[in-house]
């Protein structure tokens, strides 16, 4: 039996969900016996396989056009798409920007901060992505599984991935898994 391929990426968030993933500690050895860990922020591969993966995991919300592109690509290349963490599930802390707008947030970040000198300016370049109203991943693509939490626990992530690897779909209830 071939191991299921798993890819992940992070969007607008703090990377805390991937830190929780790393907090599975030595169980990662057990997990890689069950899954083929492909592209992730913690591996050299950065884009999901063109031929697709079994499970795609996205952390963080959608805050710009690049995030939208990443979410669409992950959806196109994943049999099962997982929204991991509160930012991915409902926008989380990054969505607080929606109360003020991207322009106000960028001005504060690049011009008004205490550590910014008088030459501070908001970056502007055609290569940069365009900010959008922060939204959950499901507003852009179909999500199959929602795992809330800020951040979800290492135990929850490990159990969920190991169940998927064995062909079982655990039921998520709030920030808990139904352990069957």
Image (cartoon, grey):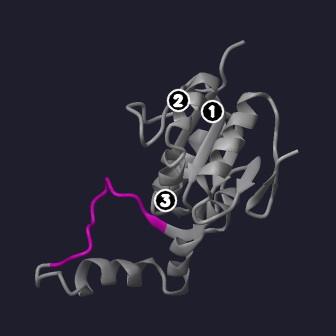
Badge 1 crowding class, 10 Å Cα cut-off, few under 14, some 14 to 19, many 20 or more, is: many
Q: Nearer the viewer, mark 3 or mark 1?
A: 3
Let me know if residue 130 is in the magenta part: yes
Badge 2 crowding class, 10 Å Cα cut-off, few under 14, some 14 to 19, many 20 or more, is: few
Q: Residue at x 48, y 46 (%)?
A: 22
- Quadrant assignment for the N terminus: top right
Q: Secondary structure at mark 1?
A: loop
Q: Give whichever of 124, 79 is nearer the camera.
A: 79
Q: Which mark is residue 29?
A: 2
Side (left or right) of 53 relative to 44: right
Image quadrant where residue 122 sits? bottom left
Label 1 sits on residue: 77
Distance of mark 3 from mark 1, alpha carbons?
A: 24 Å
Q: Which mark is residue 16?
A: 3
Q: Secondary structure at mark 3?
A: helix
Which of pointers 3 and 1 lies earlier in the amino acid sequence? Answer: 3
Q: Which range of residues does the magenta coloring cover? A: 120-131
Q: Give whichever of 116, 40 is nearer the camera.
A: 40
Which of pointers 2 and 1 lies earlier in the amino acid sequence? Answer: 2
Q: Residue at x 57, y 40 (%)?
A: 73
Looking at the magenta stretch, what is its main secondary structure?
Answer: loop
Q: Position of residue 23 (x, y in %)?
A: 50, 49
Q: Give whichever of 176, 89 is nearer the camera.
A: 176
Distance of mark 2 from mark 3, alpha carbons?
A: 21 Å
Distance of mark 2 from mark 1, alpha carbons?
A: 25 Å
Image quadrant where residue 43 sits? top left
């Amino acid at each position: 039996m071939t191991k299921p391929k798993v890819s992940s990426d992070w969007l607008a968030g703090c990377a805390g969900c991937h830190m929780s993933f790393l907090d599975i500690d030595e169980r990662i050895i057990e997990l890689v016996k069950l899954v083929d860990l492909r592209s992730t922020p913690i591996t050299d591969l950065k884009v999901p396989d063109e031929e697709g993966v079994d499970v795609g995991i996205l952390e963080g919300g959608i805050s710009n056009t690049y995030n939208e592109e990443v979410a669409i690509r992950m959806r196109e290349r994943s049999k099962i798409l997982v929204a991991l963490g509160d930012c991915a599930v409902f926008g989380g802390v990054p969505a607080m920007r929606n109360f003020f707008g991207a322009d106000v947030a960028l001005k504060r970040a690049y011009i008004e901060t205490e550590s910014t000198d008088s030459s501070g300016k908001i970056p502007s370049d055609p290569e940069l992505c365009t900010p959008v109203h922060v939204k959950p991943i499901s507003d852009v693509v179909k999500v199959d599984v929602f795992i809330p939490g800020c951040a979800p626990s290492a135990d929850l992530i490990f159990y969920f991935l190991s169940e998927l690897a064995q062909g079982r779909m655990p039921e998520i209830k709030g920030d808990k898994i139904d352990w069957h």
